[in-house]
Amino acid sequence: MKNNIKKVVLAYSGGLDTSVIVPWLVENYGASVTAFIADVGQGDDLEQVADKAIKSGATNAVIEDLKHEFVTEYIFPTMRAGAIYEGKYLLGTSMARPVIAKHQVRVALAEGADAVAHGCTGKGNDQVRFELAYKAFAPQMQVIAPWREWDIKGRDDALAYAASHNVPVSQTTTKIYSRDGNLWHLSHEGGELEDPWNEPNPDMFQLSVDPEQAPDTPTTIELEFKQGTPVSLNGVELDPVNMVANLNAVGAANGVGRIDLVENRLVGMKSHGVYETPGGTLLYTAHRELEALTLDRDTMHYKDLIAQKYAELVYNGLWFTPLREALDAFVTRTQDRVTGTVKLKLYKGNVIVAGRKSPYSLYQESVVTFMRDQVFNQAHADGFINLFGLPITVRSMVNQGILGKLEFGD
């Protein structure tokens, strides 16, 4: 099979794993390698990343700006769904993999490549996310997953391989975090985090200020949404990419969005990761508050069930599936009237809801007021309670042997 592969398109980040994969593919497959570099807002100098790929042995490098698509077609739909994996994880890596893989396949088909490759380990979720996306767009394409083939057993071996092939990497044996960053978040795994008893090293964090060192005065922001999508921050309209970037900045400055999580991986093991998602934390909080104001009870409660399933689909790499698309259609319908403004107060890592309003608010002061009102007849509650509690009443009468001896409501 190796002899049949002449050209490979590699999902290339410039990190330790993909850096050593380039010379390994050339050495073991004798194939030309195209480094596919997706700009999903990770903040790297991608021209330097491309230059590094060429110097490592790649024939060429292709850079694609996917930030707008990432935000509008992956981040916002997931946020509108309210999808949070295991109650904490805002799915930053999970959402990025399908958009990267989709365009990697597009480049591979355009270049007439024989195979696509990725640097995901055999222990993780990302291998599934990449390869299910490959199957969705090019099931005939061969897939090379070096971590499932080579003799490199860990990061120490990878560092040694990089040194022997003159591949420059930023990781060292003492600073060996596995990180994934994009416009939505930055994740950290490895190092001292492999023991979940260890508190993260303060120096590990790269986006957010330590909450203890955040400003001593709160920062108040106002987020406006139209049909579930954020459109303006503090009265200033922003395009989707700048919206997330600006929320990241203000959230990070106030120590917002740090999440420490032991999660259940799809492959069956548990892992310990720390995530920084400042802007995402603000968006999820504000969006939820606006839904609480504008969605009726049954729709909101059913949507909570959908949110859990949606999160599992995204986490498990099942983005390009009929079920995820069908859930999206449901969520989109629920957002018709999720329009309004939410006021948040940010203080030392906390996000405090300070106000919310909507022209479609189902909260009506005239109905819920504790003052004298002319809208709600409290005497009607008696009949409601009798009917709502009828199953309880009947069961109790049967247990006491008094069924038929008393009138319901006595």
Image (tube, rainbow, N blue to C red):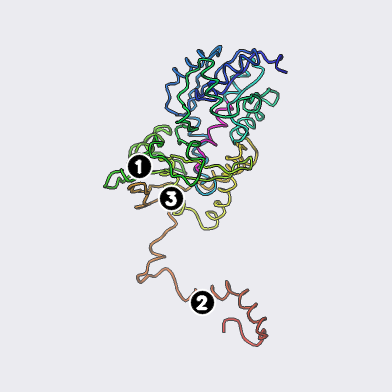
Amino acid at pointer 3: Leu
Q: Count neighbours of disc 1 (C-alpha within 10 A) and say few if under 14, some if 14 to 19, many if 20 or more.
A: some
Figure quadrant of residue 18: top right
Amino acid at pointer 2: Asp
Quadrant holding the C terminus:
bottom right
Query: Which secondary structure class fits the magenta region best?
Result: helix
Mark found first going from the N terminus, 3 or 2: 3
* 203 left or right of 139 in image: left
Look at the picture and state if 405 lies above or below 224: below
Figure quadrant of residue 219: top left
How far across and down, in percent of the image, does residue 203 sit? 38, 36
Question: Would you say residue 111 sits in the magenta stretch?
Answer: no
Q: Which residue is drawn at 58% across and 23% down?
A: 104
Q: Which of marks 1 and 2 is in front?
A: 1
Q: For this rendering, which residue is in front, 324 or 257?
A: 257
Mark found first going from the N terminus, 3 or 1: 1
Q: Where does label 2 land, which residue?
A: 382
Q: Which residue is drawn at 55% across and 30% down?
A: 99
Q: Where does label 3 land, which residue?
A: 290
Q: For this rendering, which residue is in front, 386 or 61?
A: 61
Q: For this rendering, which residue is in front, 263 or 103?
A: 263
Q: Could you say whether the residue bearing mark 3 is in a helix, strand or loop?
A: helix
Q: Could you say whether the residue bearing mark 1 is in a helix, strand or loop?
A: loop
